[in-house]
Amino acid sequence: MAKETADQAFLEYLVKSIVDHPDDVTVDRKVDEMGVLLSLKVNPQDMGQVVGRQGSTAKSIRSLLRIVGIKNNARVNLKIEEPEGSTRGPRPMRSAEDSNY
């Protein structure tokens, strides 16, 4: 197994602290010319906790990873893998009339 890096270890620790099934959390790390890509896989029942309401938790996790990346001179991106057997359907289209603005 490859040596675990600071960004990968941080993401794994953070997500395992949030979810109900910490043993199902896996983080894959790939490096290319665009920077570092961390792919996160969690139990299908934990997707809501990782993404959060309107994606707020996922956005916060990405912000924290950016900070870890800056400290290590790397551009870090997060991809949350859609789990097998996910019950989420396609997102409904919203019209301008549905908006509260």
Image (cartoon, rainbow, N blue to C red):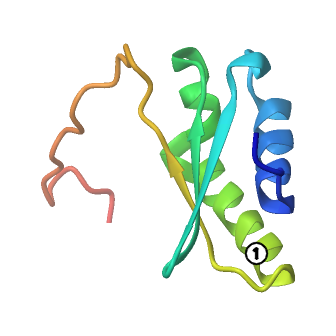
Image point (49%, 47%), residue name:
54
Q: Secondary structure at mark 1?
A: helix
Q: Is residue 100 visible?
A: yes
Residue holding disc 1: 69
Relative placement, left or right, of 3 versus 93 is right
Check the image and report above or below for 83 versus 75. above
Residue 40 lies, with reference to residue 73, above or below; the image says above
Q: Which is more toward the observer, 86 or 38?
A: 38
Residue 26: x %, y % from top left:
67, 33
Q: Residues within 10 Å of mark 1 (few under 14, many from 20)?
A: some
Across and down, in percent, residue 28 comes to 62, 45
Image quadrant for the C terminus? bottom left
Q: Taking 49 as reference, is 20 above or below it?
A: above
> Which amino acid lies under the numbered mark 1 shown in the image of this protein?
Gly
- How many numbered marks have been drawn onto this rendered protein structure? 1
User: In the displayed structure, does residue 38 sit left or right of residue 2?
Assistant: left
Of 59 and 100, nearer the camera is: 59
Q: Nearer the viewer, residue 93 or 4?
A: 4
What residue is rendered at 74% in x and 25% in y?
Answer: 19
Residue at 33% in and 57% down: 100
Residue 52: in sight, yes or no? no
Can you give x and y, in whole percent of width and height, for residue 57 in the image? 65, 48
Query: Dividing the picture into quarters, in which one does residue 68 lie?
Result: bottom right
Q: Quadrant of residue 61?
A: bottom right
Write the residue at 76% across / 38% down: 15
Outermost residue to the front: 1
For the N terminus, the image quarter is: top right
Instruction: Compare residues 82 and 18 and report the one nearer the observer.
Output: 82
Residue 24: image x %, image y %?
Answer: 68, 19
81 displayed left or right of 87: right
